[in-house]
Amino acid sequence: MTIEEIIDNFSLLDDWDDRYRYVIELGRNLDPLPEAARNEVNKVQGCASQVWLDTKIEANGKAGPVLRFRGDSDAHIVRGLIAILLTLYSGKPARDILETDAIAVFERLALREHLTPQRSNGFRSMVERIKSDARGALVAA
């Protein structure tokens, strides 16, 4: 699934209860995160819920490193937000990650006004963590 498909599916749902259910369903479709990846290194700070992001970096020659992410949370709606972020960022070159504005996507989905401030801040913390990993991968390349 692409981010555009998620945005299109979201736009078909008029009721916010249906949109929440869709976000939760996206989270249910995440691959399970192994217990070993639920550690302090992968824990995202700044989230009200428990959130883990596991990052794998692959060399890609002149194009620069490609990052693959796995994630999980103990909150259903946050798992869905993670699924949206992984769709947007996982498998992409570090430079593309740094140029992609997840907050703009978040606003296109009108999630900002329908999530608690803590969830919105958590979303930003996850985005910053992903971008920080991308910056680190470029420096190490």
Image (cartoon, rainbow, N blue to C red):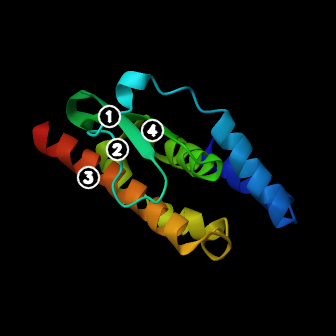
Task: Please say whether residue 1 is visible from this viewpoint.
Answer: no
Of mark 2 and mark 4, the one earlier in the sequence is 2
Q: CA distance from mark 2 to mark 1?
A: 6 Å
Label 2: which secondary element: loop
Q: Residue at label 1?
A: 39
Q: What residue does disc 4 label?
A: 90
**Furthest-left residue in view?**
140
Element type at mark 3: helix
Pointer 2 with pointer 4, Cβ within 8 A: no
Disc ID at residue 43: 2
- Give me the residue at 37% from left, 50% from top: 97
Of tags 3 and 4, the one toward the viewer is 3
Left/right of residue 54 with respect to residue 15 in the rendered view: left
Q: Amino acid at mark 2?
A: Lys
Q: Nearer the viewer, mark 2 or mark 4?
A: 2
Of marks 1 and 3, the one in the foreground: 1
Q: Is residue 9 left or right of residue 54?
A: right
Relative horizontal placement of residue 9, taking residue 119 as reference (left or right): right
The amino acid at mark 3 is Ser
Instruction: Identify the residue at horizontal 33%, vertical 55% (top origin).
Output: 45
* Callout 2 touching callout 3 (CB < 8 Å): no
Q: What residue is at 26 percent from the left and 39 percent from the top?
A: 41
Q: Looking at the image, do the residues carrying marks 2 and 1 touch, with CB atoms under 8 Å apart?
A: yes
Identify the residue at the far bottom of this view: 113
Say which label, 2 or 3, has the lower sequence index: 2
Label 1 – label 3 distance at C-alpha: 18 Å
Q: x, y percentage for residue 118?
A: 50, 69
Q: Is residue 62 left or right of residue 70?
A: left
Mark 4 nearby-residue class (10 Å; few <14, some 14–19, many ≥20): some
Sequence-earlier tag: 4 or 1 = 1
